[in-house]
Image: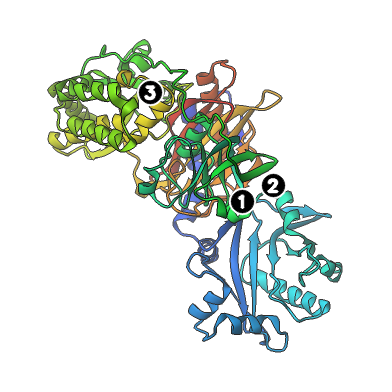
């Protein structure tokens, strides 16, 4: 396979390896990376404007805007950050420094004789332009009714004048849509559509726009039903008080969610984040809605409710009934692979160890999967990996911790949530105050000196209770980074912190939910060179599944830079989400990135998609191996290496196709 410089791929029987494909892509992207490093003034302007967008209906990038100085020959179009200025009037008063109150502002909008301002919303459709009657539309404009006193003709002229100003502010390539209301009481109504018949604009309602863009006012990440107490969660401290029969309403994007009856977030979720995958694995209903008011449920906080999340219906209703929620599976306990200390306490080199020994039982699931991935795709697509088996962990807990683990296992059913958190904290402290075997530290030091001198490495958790076909465990345990030149004392401290994370509150609760015997859980370590945040062009998650015709669909969530898809932290932060066919062609777009696209809308790395798809298919075929009902979950990075983009797969695991 080779490139002709046009971003397309062609077959060549002499060039079929992953390494040659990657090398070919590197040459193809010289110009692309130059453009990333030194964007044009136009691109910078567009990038700045995109920073102020928010997501409407879970998908459409949107600006809030005001046209000012309406009586002048050329009014000024302002787009602004909706988080910084809550409302059009606030922007005019605080940013434009016009000394007004809201009543005065409204009068300067509604009265055509005094009009100075036109508030509006601008929808960016460039990632999924609409085709209507042979024309392409890549933006839409909505003006709300501020109790206008205009005639229909005057309002139509207002809309037309405003629409003609928009392309001077944003570099749209195609025509615009005028959004009108269905409600006859609204002055900006569909009856105005006749005024636009002989223009380049078309008219539709917001409902039409949602249907044509496959967007929505809500996002269902996992369907289901539950009954429980509706609880408001403002921060992580409040989340610690949640109980299994609560339906949690998060006013932020949580990185950890304990087992609960239902999950509602008031900010869009990344569909393939760790939180979303864990909820799916548990069978917990999980949705995003902008506000409880959207489903008329704000008055239900603190009350017993029935939560329904189905494609045709999202609802919260008052109830006095109970429902058997999936908040515990202890009746169907999950048995873990038995962790063994067979490989001793030293470092395991994947390249020099028989594949038959690189198993979940010897080095944990994450490391075992990584060893398979490295041998499958080669070091060009997967960075060189190493592991430390389970024996050092056994040695650590035998020093002083095992007795506390056994005590918690015996008492857990009679302890309060606070008492369980205290016991887990004691276990973690005991582990962190223990000693790593000398042979482990010496072996690790030798590896660092020989292979990672002057570099940073990542010590990643690799347990026998994560990344399993029937227990995902995404994001439950911790990893630690360290500079290879650090002293052995610090190296030992980092290893102990990773071991202690086996007993994190979230990890314990998740194992408890699945009825896992905690005493059989154990921790090994995967070792890799760390990815440098400064050179990270992007990261993402891929999930594969079969469609009705048994063809593989490739679902991609991606984000630019080092903003993690797996653990999004900022409110309103949206990843680009789309589907590929087996040839790497985009077949469906869900959302654009709020930070700038990597792949969509002719993003800088769009030509990577066939290669990304090909590696995904190879990985799926190897890991799934004809197991029905499973796809593969892959995490990837795109790094800037010597001025070229380089794709790495960093993790792969089986995932049930119900996702």
Quadrant of the rendered structure where residue 149 is?
bottom right
Quadrant of the rendered structure where residue 657 is?
top right
Residue shown at 54%/32% (left/top)?
543
Depicted 358 relative to depicted 612: above or below = above
- Tell me the SS state at disc 3: loop
How far is mark 2 from mark 3, CA to CA?
38 Å
**Residue denoted by label 1:** 59
Rendering coords of residue 298 (x, y %): 56, 54
Q: Which mark is residue 533?
A: none
How far is mark 3 from mark 1, CA to CA?
35 Å
Is 384 positioned to the left or the right of 172 in the image?
left
Residue shown at 19%/34% (left/top)?
429
Depicted 469 relative to depicted 382: above or below = above
Q: Which mark is residue 214?
A: 2
Q: Nearer the viewer, residue 533 or 550?
A: 550
Crowd rating for badge 1 (residues with CA inside 10 Å; few <14, some 14–19, many 20+): many
Is 63 positioned to the left or the right of 206 in the image?
left
Q: Who comes first in sequence, dot 3 or dot 1?
A: 1
Rendering coords of residue 518 (x, y %): 33, 22
Depicted 523 relative to depicted 261: above or below = above
Rendering coords of residue 351 (x, y %): 33, 19
Crowd rating for badge 2 (residues with CA inside 10 Å; few <14, some 14–19, many 20+): some
**Quarter in which the N terminus is drawn:** top right
**Residue denoted by label 3:** 465
Farthest bottom residue? 113
Q: Nearer the viewer, residue 255 or 486?
A: 255
How far is mark 2 from mark 1, CA to CA?
8 Å
Is 539 positioned to the left or the right of 550 in the image?
left
Residue shown at 25%/14% (left/top)?
341
Task: Say whether marks 2 and 1 touch (CB < 8 Å).
Answer: yes
Of the residues tagged 2 and 3, which is closer to the observer?
A: 3
């Amino acid at each position: 396979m080779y490139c002709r410089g046009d971003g397309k791929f062609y077959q060549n029987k002499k060039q079929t390896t992953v390494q040659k494909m990657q090398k070919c892509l590197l040459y193809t992207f010289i110009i692309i990376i130059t453009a990333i490093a030194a964007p044009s003034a136009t691109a910078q302007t567009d990038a700045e404007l995109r920073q102020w967008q928010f997501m409407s209906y879970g998908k459409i990038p949107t600006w809030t805007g005001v046209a000012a100085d309406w009586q002048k020959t050329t009014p000024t179009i302002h787009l602004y950050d909706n988080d910084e200025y809550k409302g059009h009037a606030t922007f005019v008063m605080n940013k434009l420094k016009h000394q007004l109150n809201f009543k005065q502002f409204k009068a300067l909008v509604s009265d055509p004789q005094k009009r100075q301002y036109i508030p509006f919303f601008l929808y960016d459709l460039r990632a999924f332009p609409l085709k209507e009657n042979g024309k392409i539309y890549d933006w839409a404009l909505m003006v709300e009714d501020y109790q206008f006193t205009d005639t229909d003709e005057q309002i139509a002229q207002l809309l037309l004048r405003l629409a003609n100003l928009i392309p001077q502010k944003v570099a749209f390539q195609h025509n615009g849509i005028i959004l009108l209301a269905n409600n006859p009481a609204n002055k900006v109504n569909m009856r105005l559509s006749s005024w636009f018949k002989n223009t380049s604009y078309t008219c539709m309602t917001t409902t039409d726009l949602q249907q044509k863009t496959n967007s929505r006012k809500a996002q269902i990440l996992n369907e289901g039903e539950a009954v429980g107490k509706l609880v408001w969660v403002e921060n992580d401290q409040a989340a610690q008080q949640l109980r299994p029969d609560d339906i949690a309403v998060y006013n932020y994007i949580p990185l950890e969610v304990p087992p609960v009856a239902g999950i509602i977030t008031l900010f869009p979720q990344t569909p393939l984040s760790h939180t979303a995958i864990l909820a799916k694995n548990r069978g917990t209903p999980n949705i995003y809605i902008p506000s409880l008011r959207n489903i008329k449920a704000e008055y239900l906080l603190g009350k017993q409710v029935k939560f329904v999340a189905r494609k045709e219906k999202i609802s919260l209703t008052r109830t006095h009934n109970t429902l058997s929620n999936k908040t515990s599976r202890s009746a169907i306990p999950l048995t873990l692979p038995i962790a063994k200390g067979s490989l001793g306490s030293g470092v395991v080199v994947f390249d020099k160890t028989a594949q038959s020994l690189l198993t979940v039982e010897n080095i944990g699931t994450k490391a075992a999967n990584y060893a398979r991935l490295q041998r499958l795709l080669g070091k060009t697509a997967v960075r060189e990996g190493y592991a430390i088996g389970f024996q050092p962990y056994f040695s650590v807990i035998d020093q002083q911790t095992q007795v506390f683990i056994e005590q918690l296992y015996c008492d857990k059913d009679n302890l309060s949530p606070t008492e369980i958190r205290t016991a887990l904290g004691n276990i973690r402290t005991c582990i962190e105050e223990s000693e790593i075997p000398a042979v482990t530290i010496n072996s690790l030091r030798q590896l660092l000196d020989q292979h990672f001198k002057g570099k940073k490495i990542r010590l990643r958790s690799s347990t026998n209770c994560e990344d399993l076909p029937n227990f995902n465990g995404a994001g439950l345990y911790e990893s630690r980074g360290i500079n290879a030149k650090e002293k052995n004392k610090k190296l030992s401290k980092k290893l102990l912190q990773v071991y202690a994370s086996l007993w994190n509150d979230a990890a314990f609760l998740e194992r408890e939910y699945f009825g896992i015997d905690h005493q059989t859980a154990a921790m090994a370590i995967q070792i890799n060179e760390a990815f440098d945040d400064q050179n990270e062009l992007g990261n993402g998650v891929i999930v594969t599944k079969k469609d009705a015709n048994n063809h593989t669909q490739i679902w991609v969530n991606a984000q630019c830079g080092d903003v993690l898809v797996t653990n999004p932290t900022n409110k309103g932060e949206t990843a680009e989400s789309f589907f590929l066919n087996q040839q790497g062609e985009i077949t469906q777009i869900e959302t654009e990135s709020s930070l700038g696209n990597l792949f969509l809308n002719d993003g800088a790395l769009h030509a990577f998609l066939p290669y990304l798809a090909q590696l995904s298919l190879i990985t799926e075929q190897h890991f799934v191996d004809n197991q029905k009902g499973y796809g593969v979950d892959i995490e990837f990075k795109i790094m800037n290496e010597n001025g070229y983009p380089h794709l790495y797969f960093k993790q792969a695991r089986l995932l049930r196709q119900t996702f």
